[in-house]
Amino acid sequence: MGIQLMGLAHAKQKLQRTLSAKIRMVVSASTNVPKGHVAIYVGESSFYRKRFVIPISYLNHPLFQDLLNLAEEEFGFDHPMGGLTIPCSEDYFISLTSALNCS
C-alpha cells in the first residue's frame, strides 16, 4: 500500500512539473518582449488591434506622451487587451515610431 502511494505522489509531481512547463511555454510565447521594450496594442477598432513592441525610451517622448494621455482618456487604467492599448490608427503609430527611431 505504501508503494502505491509513493507511485501516486511521484506521478502527481511529474504531472505538475509537466503542466507548469507547458504554462510557462504558452506565457513566454505570448509575452515575448525583449528587455527594455514594452508591448503596445494599436488600433481604432475595438475588434482588431495590432501588437507592437517598442523601446521603453519612446514612452518619455512628448509626442508619445500625447498618445498615452489619449489612451488614459479612452480606457483609464482598464485596458481591454490586458496590455497598454493606444486608440490611434496603425499608420499614425508607425509614422510616429519611425520618426522617434530616426531622432
Image (spheres, rainbow, N blue to C red):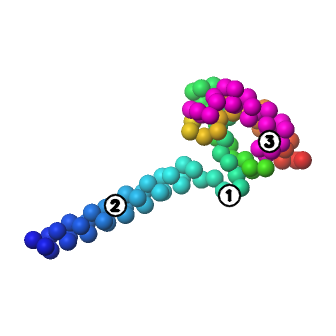
Q: Which residues are magenta?
A: 58-80
**Mark before the other along the chain sequence, 1 or 2:** 2
Q: Nearer the viewer, residue 69 or 18?
A: 69
Q: Which mark is residue 16?
A: 2
Residue 56, percent across and down?
74, 49
Residue 64, percent across and down?
79, 38
Q: Nearer the viewer, mark 1 or mark 3?
A: 1
Residues at marks 1 and 2, CA–CA distance in whole angstroms? 29 Å
Q: Nearer the viewer, mark 2 or mark 3?
A: 2
**Mark before the other along the chain sequence, 2 or 3:** 2
Residue 55, percent across and down?
75, 50
Q: Which mark is residue 97?
A: 3
Q: Amino acid at mark 1?
A: Lys
Q: Residues within 10 Å of mark 3 (few under 14, many from 20)?
A: some
For residue 82, say whether it is visible. Answer: yes
Q: Residues within 10 Å of mark 1 (few under 14, many from 20)?
A: few
**Mark before the other along the chain sequence, 1 or 3:** 1
Residues at marks 2 and 3, CA–CA distance in whole angstroms? 43 Å
Q: Amino acid at mark 3?
A: Thr
Q: Which mark is residue 35?
A: 1
Residue at horizontal 65 percent and vertical 45 percent from the top: 39
Residue 84, by quadrant, is top right
Indicate the secondary structure of the residue bearing disc 3.
helix
Task: Tell me if residue 3 is in the magenta stretch.
Answer: no
